[in-house]
Each structure stands twice: as structure tokens, then as C-alpha cells.
Image (spheres, rainbow, N blue to C red):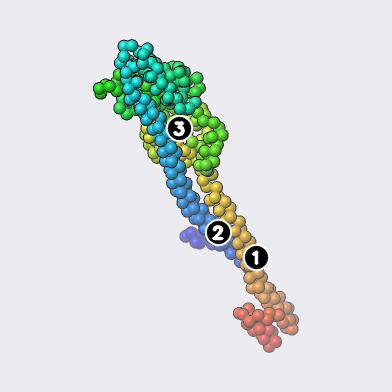
Amino acid sequence: MDANQFISTKSDPLLRKLSIQQRLPLYICTLLLAIVVSFSLAAYYSLENATVSIGKERLRAITNQLSTILGQSGQAVVRQVSEAANKAAIKNYLQSSNKNQLRDSALNVLNKLKSDTNTVSITLLDSNLKPVLQSDKARKIININLHKVMADDHFTPGLPKVGKLYVVNRLMYYATIAAVIDKGHPVGFITNWRLLKATPKALTDLSQLVGTNATIYIGNIDGSLWTDMLKPVASLPVDIKRINDFFTYKNANGDNMIAATQVIAATNWVILVEFAEKKVLDGVNRFLHFLLIIGGLLIITGILIAWRISYNITEPLKQLTVAARAIAGGDYMMPVGVKSGDELGELANAFNIMAKN
């Protein structure tokens, strides 16, 4: 027994219990339902793929823009510290045996490095990393071993950059270290420690500017620390070896997320921007709901039309059946009142003629 025979034997007994007037709307409803579901699913998945692709392009563009902005800010800090390290007042102070006479001029250079409230410590060190002078305007002591910092940052005297993030008493700091070079050799260092912080309002405004309820994270390039710029956060589920790539994962709430990462120039940082997939697909889901509503209306309309068609077909047949029963009972005077010009009308006329004869 083949599949068609199996379907026929299983379904026909059920369908035979239904009248033609019932079966025709059922067939048409099934056909319309199959068409609506197939079209809706095909349109949804096609639009979903296109929307996700567009969302990723937008995510990449946003990540690149934010990376560029932060990189330019980092380069400005690096340039400022490097220029201070090249000042004659700093070199002379480090190499002088009578530092008291040169203290004010060197201190003036250090004080100018404090450009905002995020600068918390500016220190001049000798070649052995021993502090010899500290800015009056930024005197906080950051208890982090500088040898470790320079090793972590892969510090190169001629290529200073914004260093990694460190947590001290729940606050996040980073250092920019520039070597004081004289005759090709470092004679000292300037360390500029800054506090990484942002206000909730500033982050909310930035998220609204980015759109799609984006969340922005900054992290060390080795993945050792991530932060939302308010506090440290748990490690993000991204492969740090695939920087400048896209990632998909579930967040702590179980929502599917799409994220992109980008290295920030002149820093040891990477930026990550994530979108909730459901936010990206909001428009697609609304479109699917619209399709389902339209499909439902089409199915209802199709059923009504099919019912009307089946009624127009079966009603004459019912009249013919009644007349045939009357004739079978000996009543030859009951005409079939079908006046249409189609095949059913011709059948009714033929039946009436047969009854008269």
C-alpha cells in the first residue's frame, strides 16, 4: 500500500460523513491556511535574516564610532603626558643634584597635566620607579605596583598608551606612563593615574543616542576586567581572541544578545556594544503579527466565499434530490425550481422534461 492509498483509506471515511457544502469550505480553508502559513514563515525568516544583517552592520558602525571617539580621547591623554615628559624642566629636575632650585618649574609642568576631576595622581619617578615629585593638584596614592602595571601594559618607552584598568576599593583606575628620555635612554617616568567613571544619566543618554537599548562595556584587552563604566561586571561570554568580531550569547536574564567588539586605539582596552535580539527584531515581529491578522481575515473571507459557492452548488442538488424522491413516490408533478443557466440549470430542465414525459 502506497502513501496515497494510506491517506485515502484513513481520511475518506471521515470526509464522507461531511456534506459537499461542508467539505468545500474545509478544503478551501485548508488551502488558504497552508498558503498563509507558508508565505508568512517565508517572509518572516527572510525579513529576519535581512534585519539581523542590517542590525549587525549598524552595531559594527556604532562600535567603530565609539572606539574612535574613545581612542581620540586616549591619544589626547597620551600626547599630553608625552609632551610633559619631553619638557626641559622635567629632564633637568631628574638629572640635577640640587633639585630644590628646579622644583617649582618641574612641578608647574606636572600641575598642568590635571585637566579634569578624573585625574587623581600625577607623579614624576626616577629611572628606578622611585617617586621624586608629585603634583600638588593630583596627589592621591594609587597602591598598585608600577612594575606590574608596566609589565601588564607591555610598556615601551617610546610608545606610551593608556594602560589597563585596575580596581582599588571598588573604584577603577588606569595609568598613562611616559618615559623621560635623554640621549636615547630613560632617566625617569611620568605616571598619570585617572579614574574611570561615568554618571548613570550620561550612560542613559548615550544608550538612547545609540538606540535599540544598547549596553556599552569597556574591558581590558586581555579580558581580565569588564565594566559598564559605573562598576566592574562579571566576565562577558566573548572570546577575547576574536576581537573585532560579532558574538551571540544569553545575558543574565536569559535574553539573546548580539554584540560587537573593537580594540580602542592608543589603549589596552576593548569596547563591546550589545543589543537585545528581540529589540532588533521588534519590527519583524510586528510585521509577522500583521501578516497573521491579514491571513486570518483572508481565511475567514475565503470560508465565507467557499460556503456561498458550495451553497449555490448544493442547493440545486438538494432540490433535485427532493424531486427525485417525489417521483420515486409517484408524484410526477413536482418541478425543480432551478433557473440558472449553468450545468445545474440544464440538469434541472432535463429533469423537469423527464418528469413531464
User: In this rendering, would 278 be left or right of 260?
Assistant: right
Q: Amino acid at mark 3?
A: Ile
Instruction: Report the residue that reaches farthest toward the left.
Output: 183
- Nearer mark to the viewer, of 3 and 1: 3
Instruction: Report the residue that reaches farthest toward the bottom.
Output: 357
Any part of residue 152 in sight: no
What residue is shown with label 3? Answer: 218
Q: Measuring 46% from the left and 49% from the top, which residue is drawn there?
A: 54
Q: Measuring 70% from the left and 78% from the top, which residue is drawn there?
A: 323
- Nearer mark to the viewer, of 2 and 3: 3
Q: Measuring 63% from the left and 81% from the top, which residue is drawn there?
A: 341
**Vertical relation: 328 (above or below) 113:** below
Q: Amino acid at mark 2?
A: Val
Q: How crowded is the residue under tag 2: few (<14 C-alpha within 10 Å), some, or many (20+)?
A: some
Q: Amino acid at mark 1?
A: Leu
Q: How crowded is the residue under tag 3: few (<14 C-alpha within 10 Å), some, or many (20+)?
A: many
Q: Tell me how far mark 1 sits from mark 2, CA to CA.
A: 17 Å
Any part of residue 225 in sight: yes
